[in-house]
Amino acid sequence: MKLFDEVKRRKTEVLAVTTSPRAFVKTSQYFMGADNVRVALGFHPELVKQRSSEKELFFEQIRSTRFLGEIGIDGSQRAKQSLPEQIEFFDEVVHTAAVYGGRVLSIHSRGAVKEVLQIIEKYEGECVPILHWFTGSVKDTEKALELGCWFSVNPKMCFTASGKKVIGCIPLDRVLPETDAPFTHKDGVPYMPWDITVTSYMAKENNMAVDEMNLMLHRNLEALNDIR
C-alpha cells in the first residue's frame, strides 16, 4: 500500500496491470479518482488454469475496460502443463477485445513468442498490442512491428545483450518504459514506477537529453490514449 500511496503522491503516470479479475476490482477501487493511474484488467497466463472460475468475471469486465493486462501466454517450464488452456484463453481474450474495439493489451510472451504473434496476427488491426518485457529475437521483433505492436521496455532489458538488440529495433514512437514494479529488483532493491533507467538508457543510445526522451515517451503515452 505504501507504493500505491507514493504513486498517488508523485502523480507518476502509471498503467497498473493486474493478475486476475478479482485483483483488478480491488486495485481499481484503490485508485478510483487518481487521474494519473490507469488500471488494466488482467489474467496472468500462469493463473489461467487454477483460477478458471474467474473467467466469466473477466469477460464481463472487458465490456467496460479499455486496458487489458497482464494477459498472454507463458511457455516456461513451470507453466507448460497449462499451455493448451492458455492459448485457447488468450485467443478468446484477443477476439473479444477485437469485437469491442479500441482495447490496449499488455501482453506476456515468455517462452511463447511464436504462439502470441500468431494470435495477434489473427486479429491484426483490431486492438493495440503492447509486448511487455519482450524476449524474442530480432526477427521476432521485426515481425511484431509489422503487426502493429508496441513494446514496453523493462530496466532489465537495458543490461542484457538480447534486450539491447530488441530495444535497438524499436522505433521511438512505438515504445513505452515499464518497471514491472515492485517485482523486479536491482541489488535487492525493487524498481519503482518513477525509475528512469529505461529513459536514461534510451536517451544515451539516441544522443538525446534525458528530459527530451522523457517528453517523447510521455507523448507516446498520449498517442496511445488517443488510438480508438
Image (cartoon, rainbow, N blue to C red):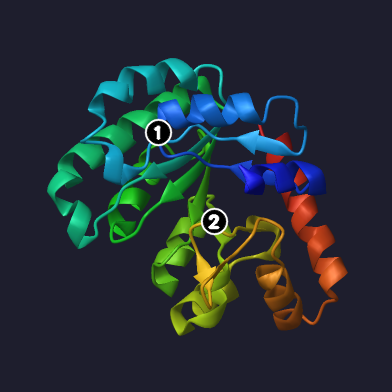
Where residue 151 appears, x then y in whole percent?
56, 57
Identify which residue, 159 or 145, lies in the foreground. 159
Where residue 2 appears, x then y in whole percent?
65, 46
> Is 27 drawn above or below residue 152 in the view shown?
above
| Mark pair 1, 2: CA separation | 17 Å
Identify which residue, 69 or 116, lies in the foreground. 69
Identify which residue, 12 or 93, lies in the foreground. 12
> Is 67 drawn above or below residue 58 in the view shown?
below
Residue at the limit of the structure toward the left, as seen here? 81
Amino acid type, mark 2: Pro
Query: Is 20 placed left or right of 165 in the picture?
Result: left
User: In terms of secondary structure, where does tag 2 sit?
Assistant: loop
Q: Residues within 10 Å of mark 2 (few under 14, many from 20)?
A: few
CB atoms at circles 1 and 2 under 8 Å apart? no
User: In terms of secondary structure, where does tag 1 sit?
Assistant: loop
Where residue 133 appears, x then y in whole percent?
48, 61
- Residue 11's quadrant in the figure? top right
Residue beneath label 2, please? 182
Q: Which mark is residue 20?
A: 1
Query: Is 5 placed left or right of 17 in the picture?
Result: right
Amino acid type, mark 1: Ser
Seen at 65% across and 43% down, the residue is: 4
Q: Residues within 10 Å of mark 1 (few under 14, many from 20)?
A: many
Residue 95 visible from this viewpoint:
yes
Where residue 40 appears, x then y in whole percent?
55, 35
